[in-house]
């Protein structure tokens, strides 16, 4: 198993999102964890090549059939064996929503779905592979844990912890073949359901998830130069939401949620639901993808179009503070 | 010999006739299960899927009491054969057979469809009741069962999986994804039984999605397929006991609403309230 060292964090960042996933799955198997991996014809894209080579008895490809992916995974998990099931986020959620509702929601099957390339990671396809609303769809599934890791080492830990935890999990991967690094401190600790505070400030509470946390950190630096101090929370678990991380910081002037997801129904939605029952609180600004489908382009272009680049995040926060 | 033939791909026919005492027993069980089904109207004035339950009584008894070790409570859960009633709206027939076999209390019927009941209109996963899979969202039971069968085969277990689907349910594409996968993986431990009653909620299947050639369609995906009279215990027994290295499908031709004259082959009884007057007639016909 990987420990948090600068070298390991760099290695996983270079491996990319799916590479980090594959490394975690391989290491779990190598360490003797008994589990199954199932994919809808994306074993190689999931970074599973070494795992499939060395542990062929614990893997199956169901073909390009995401509904069957979830059902077969659920059946294999019937004796509580953990099963990891992978496809692109857009397909691993919408295409098989009823299977997820029934098997992971109603029956609580021990299946860990990995929605790869979610958000805007598959940017050049022009919409077919965008994972814009998977969180909105899946947050309503009873008992489903949802994790959206922020960098390579966090993807690695998300997968390992999800496999060890009993019950259904959706792991939402954003980012592509090269990842930014947000966690490399030796005291980095990953626990599902517990957000990580990356910077402490007084003016703005920025709550982000996924690879976009890196843009939040860059925005924090830009704002610091303009004498605005920000607390940045990496809210890697979307459900259950770490309410303490937010409710304990209502002394900020502004709360901002940032996500690579439709501005409705995702992390921002969850935080807004949490704040709805609180009387004395700062205003909450939700940043995400507006209710439209961006045209194709490279990832940086799409972040800019959606107003989610560090510069645009910082500008919008400045505006909201009336500066 | 058996192994040789299996490996060479030739399916063995089981030609043994069913013991006449067992046949008589099962017929009596079927009669009583139909009585249980109809007696639900005594405690439940809501709509019930009467006809869907009545069509699969012999199928369920054959699997649960004749060809599988399903009813053997002494076995560890992982060794017990699995029955998945994918047409979850036939829950009443399932409870009826469970009760007939002494696996649940006979008074279950008092709480049928009641508030907080373990016995709703569709099946909900419940280890105690032998229900492995929540069904009702059609087309999900077979792929789940195929997943279970796949694991059993990969891990060298003898566990078999039986799955009952409706013919109308086969409109769901997910059924065919599972059929293709099971054929590809040669899951000889999986048996699919199609309760082929020819009707679905809106009418005759022939006018909706016609399944005249269902046998050939399933066979084309690498399955061993047999057609039987779905109310004939001997035919069901022979078909369900067949061995070989392919997954098995039994197309069981049934009469929807079997046993109640005014329900038989009338699609409106798929899901309907049984009023007092008709209940009286049904009770008479069923010997209550």
Image (cartoon, rainbow, N blue to C red):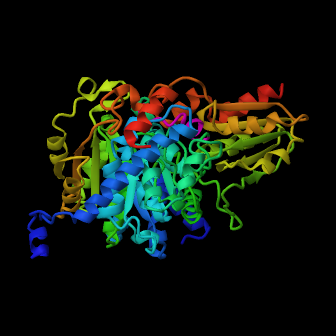
Q: Nearer the viewer, residue A105 or A290?
A: A105
Which residues are drawn in magenta? A128-139
Residue at the (42%, 32%) spot, across then down = B281
Task: Please give the count of numbered marks on the rendered protein.
Answer: 0
Q: Position of residue B54 (x, y in %)?
A: 37, 41
Query: Quarter of the image containing the N terminus of chain A?
Result: bottom right
Query: Quarter of the image containing the C terminus of chain A?
Result: top right
In magenta stretch: residue A134: yes
Eyeballing the image, is A228 above or below A19?
above
Eyeballing the image, is A93 above or below B83?
above
Q: Nearer the viewer, residue A198 or A92?
A: A92
Residue at the (75%, 34%) spot, across then down = A272
Eyeballing the image, is A191 above or below A308?
below
Q: Is residue B46 left or right of residue A206?
A: left
Q: Position of residue B97 (x, y in %)?
A: 42, 54
Eyeballing the image, is A156 above or below B275?
below
Q: Is residue B253 left or right of residue B157?
A: left
Tell me which corner region of the image, top left, top right, bottom left or bottom right, holds residue A212. Answer: top right
Q: Position of residue B248 (x, y in %)?
A: 22, 55
Residue at the (41%, 57%) spot, across then down = A75
Q: Nearer the viewer, residue B1 or B195?
A: B195
In magenta stretch: residue B165: no
């Amino acid at each position: 198993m990987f420990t948090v060292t600068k070298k390991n964090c760099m290695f996983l960042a270079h491996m990319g999102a799916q590479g980090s996933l594959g490394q975690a799955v391989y290491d779990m198997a190598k360490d003797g964890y008994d589990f199954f991996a199932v994919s809808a014809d994306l074993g190689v894209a999931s970074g599973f090549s070494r795992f499939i080579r060395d542990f062929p008895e614990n893997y199956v490809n169901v073909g390009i059939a995401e509904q069957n992916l979830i059902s077969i995974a659920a059946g294999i998990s019937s004796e509580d064996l953990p099963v990891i099931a992978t496809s692109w986020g857009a397909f691993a959620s919408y295409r098989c929503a009823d299977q997820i509702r029934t098997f992971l929601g109603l029956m609580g099957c021990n299946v860990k779905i990995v929605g790869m390339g979610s958000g805007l990671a598959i940017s050049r396809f022009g919409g077919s592979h965008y994972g814009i609303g998977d969180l909105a769809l899946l947050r309503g599934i009873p008992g489903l844990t949802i994790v959206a890791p922020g960098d390579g080492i966090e993807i690695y830990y998300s997968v390992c912890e999800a496999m060890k935890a009993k019950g259904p999990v959706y792991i939402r991967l954003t980012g592509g073949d090269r990842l930014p690094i947000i966690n490399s401190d030796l005291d980095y600790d990953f626990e599902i359901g517990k957000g990580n505070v990356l910077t402490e400030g007084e003016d703005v509470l920025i709550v982000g998830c996924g690879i976009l946390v890196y843009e939040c950190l860059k925005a924090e630096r830009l704002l610091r130069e303009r004498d605005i101090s920000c607390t940045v929370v990496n809210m890697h678990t979307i459900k259950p939401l770490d309410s303490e991380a937010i409710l304990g910081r209502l002394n900020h002037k502004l709360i901002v949620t940032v996500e690579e997801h439709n501005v409705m129904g995702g992390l921002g939605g969850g935080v807004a639901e949490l704040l709805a029952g609180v009387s004395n609180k700062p205003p909450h600004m939700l940043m995400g993808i507006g209710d439209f489908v961006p045209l194709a382009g490279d990832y940086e272009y799409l972040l800019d179009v959606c107003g989610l680049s560090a510069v645009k995040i910082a500008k919008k926060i400045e505006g909201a503070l009336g500066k | 010999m058996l192994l040789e033939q299996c490996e060479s791909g030739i399916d063995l026919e089981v030609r043994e006739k069913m013991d006449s005492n067992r046949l008589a027993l099962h017929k009596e069980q079927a009669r009583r299960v139909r009585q249980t089904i109809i007696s639900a109207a005594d405690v439940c004035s809501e709509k019930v899927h009467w006809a869907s339950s009545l069509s699969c009584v012999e199928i369920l008894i054959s699997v649960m009491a004749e060809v599988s070790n399903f009813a053997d409570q002494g076995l560890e859960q992982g060794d017990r054969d699995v029955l998945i009633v994918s047409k979850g709206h036939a829950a009443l027939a399932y409870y009826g057979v469970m009760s007939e076999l002494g696996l649940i209390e006979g008074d279950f019927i008092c709480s049928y469809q009641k508030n907080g009941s373990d016995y709703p209109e569709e099946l909900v996963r419940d280890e105690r009741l032998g229900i492995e899979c929540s069904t009702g969202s059609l087309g999900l039971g077979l792929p789940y069962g195929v997943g279970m069968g796949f694991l059993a085969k990969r891990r060298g277990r003898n566990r078999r999986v039986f799955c009952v689907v409706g013919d109308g349910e086969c409109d769901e594409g997910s059924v065919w994804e599972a059929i293709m996968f099971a054929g590809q993986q040669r899951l000889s431990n999986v048996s699919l039984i199609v309760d082929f009653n020819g009707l679905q909620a809106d009418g005759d299947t022939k006018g909706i999605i016609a399944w005249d050639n269902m046998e050939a369609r399933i066979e084309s995906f690498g399955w061993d397929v047999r057609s039987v009279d779905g109310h004939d215990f001997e035919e069901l027994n022979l078909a369900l006991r067949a061995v070989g290295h392919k997954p098995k499908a039994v197309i069981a031709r049934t009469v929807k609403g079997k046993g109640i004259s005014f329900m038989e082959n009338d699609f409106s009884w798929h899901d309907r309230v049984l009023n007092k007057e008709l209940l009286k007639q049904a009770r008479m016909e069923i010997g209550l």
